[in-house]
Image (cartoon, rainbow, N blue to C red):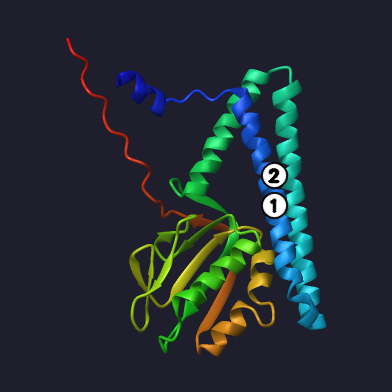
Amino acid sequence: MNKLARAFLHPRISRGQILAAILCAGLGFALVVQVRVHARGENLESARPADLVLILDNVTEESRRLTDELRELEAARQRLTFGSDRSRAALEETTKLGRTLGILAGTVPAQGPGIELSIDDPSGRLQAHDLLNALQELRDAGAEVVQINTVRVVASTHFVDDGPGRISIDGQPQTSPYVFKAIGDPATLASALQIPGGVFSNLRDSAAHADIAQRRLVRIDAVVPGPAVPPPSASPQ
């Protein structure tokens, strides 16, 4: 049991595993681009010229961001494969990968440039799907980390209507104002929310009011608890 606990707390990650993780990340980025382009393409025929300009700007910015990320992944692969100090490069990539996974899992705080979106719902007409739509638009625009009020958004986050003026997020009842903190390119995130017929238009249709502010630094401090690790059992004497 002691050996099992030590293996869990101090896993050994080989250079091959790191390379596999980097390649999987690159493949994930490609799949994300393909899905997003396909989803947007279905609505282009009915879009107005002004909408098309905004969509093109968002796609261009998203393409630039993904290209930069892919370039970083390729540079990491080169260091791990051909670098003179591959052990050090592997350690650096392991540390970076661990930090990235912690942020994605929501178990560590995060900070960076982004936006703060405040949604006021005085009439209590907003429903769970309205907040979900806002979150999805932020994700599509490249939001890397999101917090809504005191809830850290992760892959399993869910929204449920909890009565008039109340929406439950991951089992935690929330009321207006709903404050989104999102880390990502501020201009791209703000532009995506304000596309005609998009999030802001839908909120106005529900008599809700939204304010958005671009920030050089957004701090996300809400975290989700990590998996509990049972203490090792005592070895027989």
- Check the image and report above or below for 58 versus 152: below
Q: Secondary structure at mark 1?
A: helix
- Residue lying furthest top in this view? 237
Give amino acid for label 1. Answer: Leu
* Quadrant of the drawing holding the C terminus: top left
Quadrant for residue 171, please give it.
Answer: bottom left
Give amino acid for label 2. Answer: Leu
Would you say 16 lies left or right of 118 here? right
Residue drawn at x 39%, y 71% as measured from the top left: 160
Task: Please say whether residue 190 is visible from this viewpoint.
Answer: yes
- Residue lying furthest left in this view? 237
Q: Of residues 36 and 216, which is closer to you in this image?
A: 36
Disc 1 residue crowd, few under 14, some 14–19, many 20+, Cα 10 Å: few
The residue where tag 2 is placed is: 27
Residue drawn at x 67%, y 71% as measured from the top left: 192
Image position, residue 14 (x, y; %): 58, 23
Image position, residue 57 (x, y; %): 78, 68
Q: Secondary structure at mark 2?
A: helix
Task: Please say whether residue 215 is visible from this viewpoint.
Answer: no
Q: How many marks?
A: 2
Residue drawn at x 30%, y 20% as measured from the top left: 2
Q: Are marks 1 and 2 in contact (CB under 8 Å)?
A: yes
* Quadrant of the drawing holding the N terminus: top left
Disc 2 residue crowd, few under 14, some 14–19, many 20+, Cα 10 Å: few
Image position, residue 79 (x, y; %): 72, 26
Residue drawn at x 36%, y 71% as measured from the top left: 174
Mark 1 → mark 2, Cα distance in angstroms: 6 Å
The residue where tag 1 is placed is: 31
- Check the image and report above or below for 13 versus 229: above
Would you say 235 lies left or right of 216 here? left
